Image: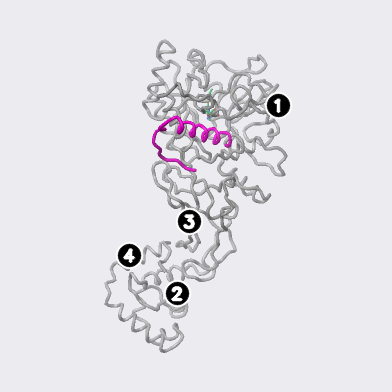
Amino acid sequence: MTITTAPALADRDEYADAIATAVRASAAYYGSGESPLDDASFDLLVSLIQAYEANYPEHTDPASPTGKVAGGAVPAGDVAHTTAMLSLANAFAPQDLLDWEASLVRRLGGPVTGGYAVEPKLDGASLAARYRAGRLVQLVTRGNGTGGEDVSHAIGTIAGLPLELTTRDSFEVRGEVLLTAEQFERANALRAAHGAGPFSNPRNGAAGTLRAKGRAYTVEMTFWAFGAVELDGGAALPGGTHSELMAYVSATGIRTAADTAAGLTVADTLAGAQEQVDRISKLRSALPFGIDGVVVKLDSLTEQAAAGNGSRHPHWATAYKLPAVERRTRLLEVTWSVGRTGVLAPTAVLEPVEVDGSVIRHATLHNPADIERRGLRLGDTVTVHKAGDVIPRVEAPVVELRTGEERAIELPSVCPGCQGAIDRSQERWRCAQPADCGRIAAILYAAGRDQLDIDGLGERYVRALVEEEGVRDVADLFTLDRAALARAAGSEKRGAKLAERIAGAKDRPLSRHIDRTTESLAGVSPAR
Ligand code: IVH
């Protein structure tokens, strides 16, 4: 289900329905990892609930997802956290950051002096990793913030969390586990090979993998730290600034947010922090992992302590949220075209969906093997990803939402450009005769009803003219002799008819056909 805009909740019944939908979605998200709502739809629903509760506080349902870590969907795990694992308050615009700064000045009783640390908000699952005497001994999920699930079985499968540190210190590092784009592709290929459904996106893949026990295959994940706390009353960690703390963690061998391509920078002023937010958000589409925002933190740990924590969020940090780049929609059809180099390219035709301000109707699928690896079917609900100017791509089907009505995607048996043979020897299928294919497609297009309208000049004859009679482009049609046309058409009579129709087409204006022919050569499927 995808919600893009919705009117305010009109009454208490609509409010109750919204709560039920949000609680169900949240439980599914933190349970199987597959919510029927994508993130943007869930956020919109929660904002409608919040707006209703602001107007009618007396109606507020205790089950409401507002005001709870993870929407209250996660039960307390069996491992108590050393200190609460909070979530972050959100900023959506520069003014929200300014308002946050004003609140800091109030809390600190004066301006921020230690600067702001700015780092990516990694889009994965929160994890605490406990090191004792330099050895990784326990992994705990965030759970409900005060207690999480022991997922130590994942030790050894997470890049960035070494089994042994370069020091023999004890501390707990906190960070995000996710699948990089490469790990996601590998994971889904591995799952397909084991007959398991694909992960619908990298974040769900990481969350599901963290909890999964006893799989016959191992999905490698990646960890990046964004914080650390003392363990067992120790004093291993530097106490000056967040950036020093992260440098220490990094020096022990653990990967941190500072080690990502987005990096960690410290800005003296909030204006400088905003510049860093803008820099990281511009980088987003080029990063090999997902981010859903940029986190701004007070760099001084003393100022962090002075600003303090609320029940859900720290006051000393905020997440500048970036627009959702992933939505869910339906895969309606797959069309095929042939590019200039003869490569056959599948395109997904989608139920239109808005992603980051633009309506997406088509998305790339790379090749037949890719379609197979992703286990896509027509009618599937799919996750679609579009970041920046990058062409939208279909990430994966949401197998949990299948109805049984989905159909297999038919792969082409002949080249969609020239109807000739396909070379399937590589993962990227190609037209077996790419040089002629472009020509045949272009001539067929130019001869079409809306252009030269040469009735009867079909694919078979054009192919024969190109392959046997040396026709290179549409202009050559007008210089062919009758014998050549008779050979291509298979009889004197048909050749004569064709000659007559070609002669008739000579009188039709050509200018616009030439332009279209060029377009067709550039990889657009011919119109026949
Ligand atoms: S700091 C006490 N920094 O976002 C605050 N969190 O919505 C601790 N996250 O639960 C969080 N990247 O799982 C922090 N650079 C980053 C982060 C980050 C991702 C996650 C984290 C947190 C959630 C809050």
- Type of the residue with mark 2: Glu
The residue to which callout 3 is attached is 347
Q: Distance between the residues labelled 1 and 3?
A: 47 Å
* Left-right relation of 85 to 481: right
Residue 128 rendering spot, x and y as whole percentages: 62, 26
Q: Residue at x 42, y 28 (%)?
A: 52
The residue to which callout 2 is attached is 459
Please, is residue 16 above or below residue 305 in the view?
Answer: below
Please, is residue 224 above or below residue 513 in the view?
Answer: above
Please, is residue 465 above or below residue 75 in the view?
Answer: below
Q: Residue at x 67, y 51 (%)?
A: 193
Badge 4: how crowded within 10 Å, few (<14), some, or many (20+)? few
Mark sitting earlier along the chain (1/4)? 1
Mark sitting earlier along the chain (2/4)? 2
Badge 3: how crowded within 10 Å, few (<14), some, or many (20+)? some
The residue to which callout 1 is attached is 137
Kindly indicate whether the residue at mark 4 contacts the one at mark 2 (C-beta within 8 angstroms). no
Residue 126 rendering spot, x and y as whole percentages: 58, 30
